[in-house]
Amino acid sequence: MMVNYYSGDPKRIQHFVKVHSFAKLIAELEKVSPEILLTVETAALVHDIGIKIAENQYRTSTDKLQEQLGPPEAEKMLNALNFNQSLIERACYLVGHHHTYDTIDELDYQILIEADFLVNIYEGQLDSKTIHQLNKNIFKTKSGKSLLEYMFKT
């Protein structure tokens, strides 16, 4: 469904597929419950759904616009796919907070943030000082920290 949503935009499709893969990997390595795994995977696939609306309406897609505009669009899509309501609510919460790092309250949220950063660090070619700061201040899971260190030699 997200591939269709971002049809013709390989950059966005590549991004959410990679974030999903890292989120699933971290969640599995952290041995989360099946429910948390499903939440993490769902949120990872739709986490940037607000970009398209933001760019169409405002010609920009700031982090705050993504967080504001993403949840209603994610809710529409997940309802159309017949996801259960509690999963939709949590996934939409994560979509609405995936650029907010001072309110991380649960493991699913932490995993999504780490997976998104693993992809964004590479795509944005962030410098080693920034990567070190992210490792120190953002990454908390053992698996996310290991992936960050293996990938970027922090």
Image (spheres, rainbow, N blue to C red):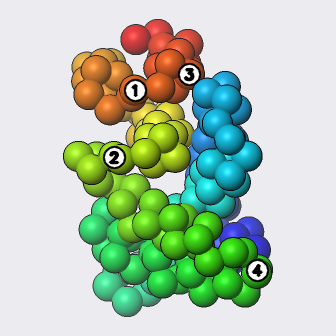
Q: Distance between the residues labelled 3 and 2?
A: 17 Å
Residue designated by label 1: 140
Upstream in sequence: badge 2 or badge 4: 4
Residue designated by label 2: 104
Left or right: where does residue 125 sit relative to residue 4? left
Q: Is residue 41 above or below residue 5?
A: above
* Residue 81, numbered label: 4
Number of numbered tags placed on the structure image: 4
User: How far across and down, in percent of the image, does residue 29 sit?
Assistant: 67, 25
Quarter where residue 8 is shown: bottom right
Q: Is mark 4 on a helix, strand or loop?
A: loop
Residue type of the residue flagged with mark 4: Leu
**132 or 32, which is in the foreground?**
32
Q: Is residue 14 above or below residue 50?
A: above
Residue designated by label 3: 143
Q: Is mark 1 on a helix, strand or loop?
A: loop
**33 or 48, which is in the foreground?**
33
Q: Is mark 2 on a helix, strand or loop?
A: loop
Q: In this view, does 14 lie above or below 128?
A: below
Left or right: where does residue 113 sit relative to residue 73? left
User: How far across and down, in percent of the image, does residue 77 sit?
Assistant: 65, 81
Residue drawn at 61 percent across, 27 percent down: 30
Residue type of the residue flagged with mark 3: Ser
Q: How crowded is mark 1: few (under 14 residues within 10 Å), some or many (20 or more)?
A: some
